[in-house]
Amino acid sequence: MKTFIVYSLDTGLPIAVGEATKAEWARTETAEKAKIRAENLIAEEIAIQIAARSNQRRPNPFLESEINGEPDR
């Protein structure tokens, strides 16, 4: 399955986001649910990447001790 955003060609705004195997099916399903003609829609495939969380702590730029490497007082 691929993830698609379906846009209205009339307004240029996104109408739906979902999964389908083809862009044509994403358009057709959205048209049926939204009661819009499929010819007025365009589907764009998007890639969703989930960033892996790191356990490493980033230095706080507002704490001078972490910037300079000095211990807190």
Image (cartoon, rainbow, N blue to C red):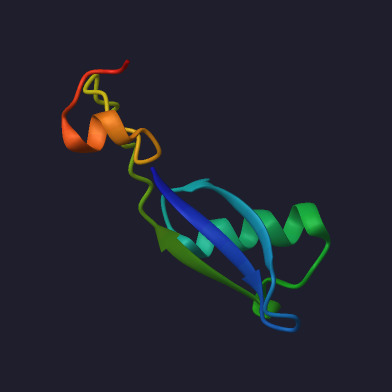
The quadrant holding residue 39 is bottom right
Q: Position of residue 41 (x, y in %)?
A: 65, 73
Q: Position of residue 70 (x, y in %)?
A: 19, 25
Q: Position of residue 71 (x, y in %)?
A: 22, 18
Q: What residue appears at the point 48 percent right and 48 percent down from the top-left corner?
A: 20
| Number of numbered markers | 0
| Left or right for 35, reference 8 | right
Above or below: residue 28 compared with residue 66: below
Q: Is residue 59 visible?
A: no
| Left or right for 64, reference 37 | left
Which residue extends farthest left? 69
Which residue extends farthest right? 35
Question: Between 41 and 12, which is closer to the camera in this rendering?
Answer: 12
Above or below: residue 7 compared with residue 67: below
Which residue extends farthest front? 73
Q: What residue appears at the point 75 percent right and 56 percent down from the top-left corner?
A: 32
The quadrant holding residue 5 is bottom right
Q: Position of residue 14 (x, y in %)?
A: 66, 65
Q: What residue appears at the point 30 percent right and 18 percent down from the top-left corner?
A: 72
Q: Is residue 68 visible?
A: yes
Q: Which corner quadrant holds the N terminus?
A: top left
Question: Between 63 and 30, which is closer to the camera in this rendering?
Answer: 63
Above or below: residue 57 compared with residue 64: above
Which residue extends farthest top? 73
Q: What residue appears at the point 66 percent right and 55 percent down from the top-left corner?
A: 16
Q: Which corner quadrant holds the C terminus?
A: top left
